[in-house]
Structure formats: structure tokens, C-alpha cells
Image: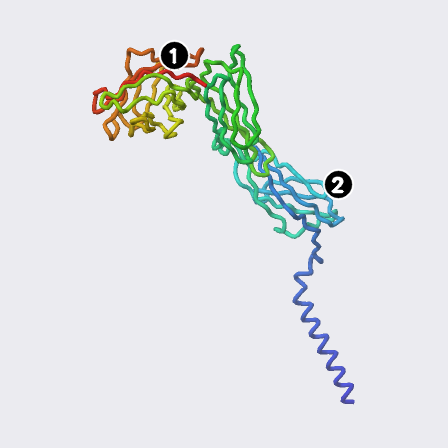
Amino acid sequence: MKKAIYVLLLVASCLGACTKMDHEYVPYLASGETFYTGVPYALETHPGRGRLEVQFTQSKDPNVTRYVISWNNGKDHLDVKPAAETKQKVVIPGLAEGDYTFEVTAYDKAGNASTPKSAVIGGTSLGSTYESGLVVRKVSVYNSMAGILLDFASVDTLCKYTIVTYTTVSGTTDSMKYTKGDAFLDTLKNASGALSYIQLKTAYVPQAGIDTFYATQSQPVNVAAGKYVCTGTMKDYTSTSITGPYPWNITLRFVTALQLELVDNDYSNDVYHKILSAGSNSYYGTFGVVFNMDKDYNVVSVVNKYGQPSSGGRSGELDPSGVNKFDPQTRTLKVKYWMNQPGATHRTSFDETFTMK
């Protein structure tokens, strides 16, 4: 009898407990059981011009019938059908330049969605602000007896190519496309000997980008810039032991379209005038020659790179009795000038001819 009473009490207790547990879950089961479809994964974004590409690996769930890519907190979206390929690449057009957050949601035919916030990634749409920050590939332009020499600096892998457009000897327009990323030299053999500028257009593709962006620039050219052999005479009025270094290898280096600085290639490898002091190589300290020219390549003044006067009291001055002109046909420059020290005292006179290599 006691055993029967115990069994009845145990059953009643279990029924009471189960009723209480079901009561607690009733609000969550009112709408039925929730199903989630498989989640897309391996998301990437690739920037473009006013657009970007969203890439993802499709869910392995065979019941998925569509994907929805949403952004702007769900205000904008794009429906995508499953593709035969495992990876989907979807271009989102019409995006203002800026950063975005995208969510990719998978749906089955019953309307069940993948787990919310499980496939989210950021991306960037690029435009005029990004493009305005790009710079053309750096190139130094020199003249030579073989033609116009282009000295290109190295660039990173984002730079895909540079197009150089120029005027030829016949007056037509020509262009060259350069894709090499390392520093290198090239010669435009058919360029005009009186070239005043070149047009540069450098193409960039951002990291993992889908579009090309450009930097453009019109770069002035001074056709008197180049490598030369300098011959001539010089006289230092203060010392007979100081004599000229001729023949002397130099570069007339571009500063502006109307200004060149004289670089000593034999001794200092800098903007100094080389001399021989008692037969030994030397140079005038705090004195570097700068030629100012007009548009017709007349030398209109000679100044000291280090000041007029420099800290050592030295300055440059053009001697108007010289030819003082660059000839684009023969590619020679003839110029006479003085180094003054101090003030207007002509310490040294120079009468030099620069013959282009």
C-alpha cells in the first residue's frame, strides 16, 4: 500500500514540474521553431570609382534561393541569385565616395534567413578626393645628342603605367607608355630639340581595386638641361696657383624651365665650381653656379646657389661681353661670368663653353 502511494506522488510531481517548464517556454514557441539557412563566408570588398565589388563564398546550404547584400543600415540592398561558381562577385554601383558596411544574408524558398550579423564587412568607394591625392611618376628630363632623356624614379606596385606625350621634330604629337616599376632611363629620339614641356599621365589601381585612377601633369622642360663637357678659361686674380679644371664633366641640372644649376661630376658631385689648386682637385667653397635664362635660352644672370652673397661673401655675376646663350641646334652653351669676393670685386673670371654629350 505504501509503495502504491509513493508511485502516485512521484507521477504527480513530474506532471507538475513539466507543466511549469512548458509554461516558461510558451512565449518563445508561439511563432513556431526558428530555422536559419547556411551563412555565406570569406567576404571581401574591392574598391572602385563610385562603386565597389563585394565578394563572398556561397553557403553550402542547398536550400538557399537568393542572397541579399544590404548597406546604409539596411536602407539600401541588392538581391543576388546563387551562381554556378562557388564565389560570388557583385558590383555595387552608384556609391558616393566614402566608407560603407555591408551585410550579406542568405534566404531559402521558405523565407528563412541566415543568422543576422554573421556575414558583415566594410568597404570603400573611391572618387575625386582619392584621385586628387595621386601624383605622377617622378621623372627628370634632360637633353642629349641622342635625344630627350627621361630618368624615371622607381614606383610601388599600385602604379601600373605612365604615358609620356611630347612634340616630335616634325611638329606632331607622339607618346610612350612605360610599365616598368624600377628606376630606368629612356631616350625620346624623335622628340623636338626645342621641347618646352611633356605631358605625364600615371595610372594607379588601388590595392585589390577594380578601377584605374589617374594623376596628370604638364611638366616643363629646359632643353639646356643635360650632361656636358665644359672647356674654356678661368683666372683667379688673387692666386696664380688656382687654375681651371678643363676639360670638366658637368651636369646642367633642371631647377625650373628657366633656371639650371651647374653640378660638378668629376670631384664634388655637387653644385660647386671645381678648380685646381696647385694642380690638385679642389673647389670654391660656398660658391655654386646657377644660370637664369629667358624663353629664348639667353643667359640673363648668373647667381650663387648659396646666396648673393653667401656666408663666405661670394656671389655670381654675368659678364655681358660673352655670347651667353644656349643653341638648341648645336646643343652648346657659351657663357662668361665672374665670382665676386667680397661685394662687387671680381675675384675670378670664367669664359666657358658647355658641349652636350
34 vs 192, nearest the viewer: 192
**Residue at (52% x, 21% y) in the render:** 187
Residue position for label 1: 296
Q: From what the image shows, is residue 100 above or below residue 349?
A: below
Q: Quadrant of residue 5?
A: bottom right
Residue position for label 2: 84
125 lies left or right of 246: right
Q: From what the image shows, is residue 53 above or below residue 166?
A: below
288 lies left or right of 357: left
Q: Residue 251: x percent and y percent?
A: 41, 23
In this view of the protein, can residue 300 be seen by the observer?
no
Distance from label 1 to label 2 (Cα)?
Answer: 68 Å
Q: Residue 71: x percent and y percent?
A: 59, 42
Q: Split into 4 quadrants, where in the image is the N terminus?
A: bottom right
**Residue at (37% x, 29% y) in the render:** 267
Crowd around label 1: few <14 · some 14–19 · many ≥20 (10 Å): few
Q: From what the image shows, is residue 159 above or below residue 55?
A: above
In this view of the protein, can residue 138 be seen by the observer?
yes
